[in-house]
Amino acid sequence: MIGHEWANWAGNQRDGAAELRPASVEEVAEAVKQARADGRTVKPVGAGHSFTAAAVTDGTRLRLDRLSGVRSVDLERKLVTVGAGTDLAVLNRLLAGYGLALPNLGDIDVQTIAGATATGTHGTGGRLGCLSTFIAGLTLVDGTGTIVHCGPGDDVFDAARVGLGALGVVTEVTLRCVDAFVLRAEERPARIADVLPGLDERIAANDHFEMYWFPYTDRLQTKTNNVVPVSDRPLSRLRGWLDDEFLSNTVFGVACRLGRRVPATVKTIARIEAVALSPRVYTAPSYEVFCTPRRVRFTELEYALPRAALPEAFAQLRRIVDRLPFPVIFPVELRVSAGDDIWLSHGYGRDSAYIAIHQYVGMPYEPYFQAFEKVARDLDGRPHWGKLHWRTAEDLRPAYPRFDDFLAVRERLDPDRVFANAYTAQVLGS
């Protein structure tokens, strides 16, 4: 094994661990057994899109890109088994080839399916849970090197669908899919006062609803997606490039670099940004609507809150932004999801609203993130496992009714803590 310099997408987490690229579940099991015998730790890594140190290790890194692609398809039951290292962008195209799709997606598709589900990645939609709720079965290698298959009715399944990489190395995921579908996307600017009072009605009336707030303004960009029978209003290639590549990436990237270099320009940039995006309505296959390219790099914190707490959390966030000694150039994202029964899911047992805050790489963020974390914690918020936060096992336990059940499964599957690292020590304890 040779050490490889690794960094996550945002560049805020790095290590130089020895790396293996197993091509089968048997090779994963052998790697885990050898590490255990040698007293070393193991960490699988996907696309590195977590902002936390979830994938950082001083032991052996397992890159799972060779464990990818479709393994089996049951068209009658709409079940598809894929390798854990399959990128979501690749998975979406593979499913489309079978006339299938995932019911919901986040707005980024560069993650691997195992990495996305391990951290509770979600999209938006009042009747839909996080991506992990679509899992119908899992195969993983536990801390003893044993290959474990699990499904509904199994406590390992209840824990491992959002497992934080702490229970084992997931090698295959069986997904419960739906028939491929078309979405009609409607994106419009709006004012906060015109949206928030009727937010519950908007969530209930649409398949997917989200919004972006531009700091230092009273403006939002709303995005509403609904299932339609056919794609009768496709976006022109020029308009798609202009909005999603040129404005949202190239121009915004220039604005961020200017704001980082000359902070006094940020408020003006934010106000221009708030009025620059024009309305658009279009139809496309679901995954093309859900996912957009994100080439401007940032750091992020996100909290899941009881849905009724969103107005108070958002109001306090706006006050925090106004008081900060430095500017915030990135918009704030607000989404929703349905409750679920996954032990460490942010949505366990309740419908949630999410507030995601960002800052351009190289700009200060900790006072901003920590101030909002205090607000979110006081409102019974749960941090996104793949986004920056400072919560610990001690104060996370009350937030998750099945926290100790998860730890009991961990004790059984990884008694020697082969999969431990600084992040699991922080959020789960020793």
Image (cartoon, rainbow, N blue to C red):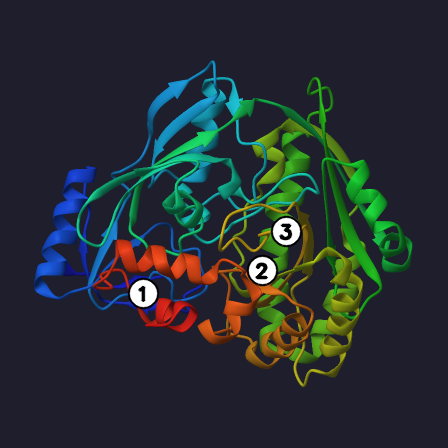
SS for tag 3? helix
Mark 1: few, some, or many residues within 10 Å (few <14, many ≥20)?
Answer: many
40 left or right, relative to 174? left
Q: Earlier in the sequence, mark 3 or mark 2?
A: 3
SS for tag 2? helix
Location of residue 160 in the rendering, given as x and y in whole percent from the top left corner: 39, 48
Residue at mark 3: 248
- Asked if residue 390 is positioned above or below residue 48 in the image, the reply reads below
SS for tag 1? loop
Q: Is residue 253 visible?
A: yes
- Asked if residue 190 is positioned above or below residue 300 in the image, the reply reads above
Q: Earlier in the sequence, mark 1 or mark 3?
A: 1
- The residue positioned 49% from the left and 55% from the top of the image is 344
Q: Are marks 3 and 2 in contact (CB under 8 Å)?
A: no
Residue at mark 2: 253
Image disc number at residue 56 = 1
Amino acid on which the number 1 mark rests in the picture: Val
Q: Residue furthest top?
A: 76
Q: Is residue 166 visible?
A: no
State the separation of the CA atoms marked 1 and 2.
28 Å
204 left or right, relative to 331? right
Amino acid on which the number 2 mark rests in the picture: Gly
Mark 2: few, some, or many residues within 10 Å (few <14, many ≥20)?
Answer: some
Q: Nearer the viewer, mark 1 or mark 2?
A: 1
Location of residue 215 in the rendering, given as x and y in whole percent from the top left corner: 74, 68
State the separation of the CA atoms marked 1 and 3.
30 Å
Amino acid on which the number 3 mark rests in the picture: Ser
- Among the 4 quarters of the image, the one containing residue 86: top left
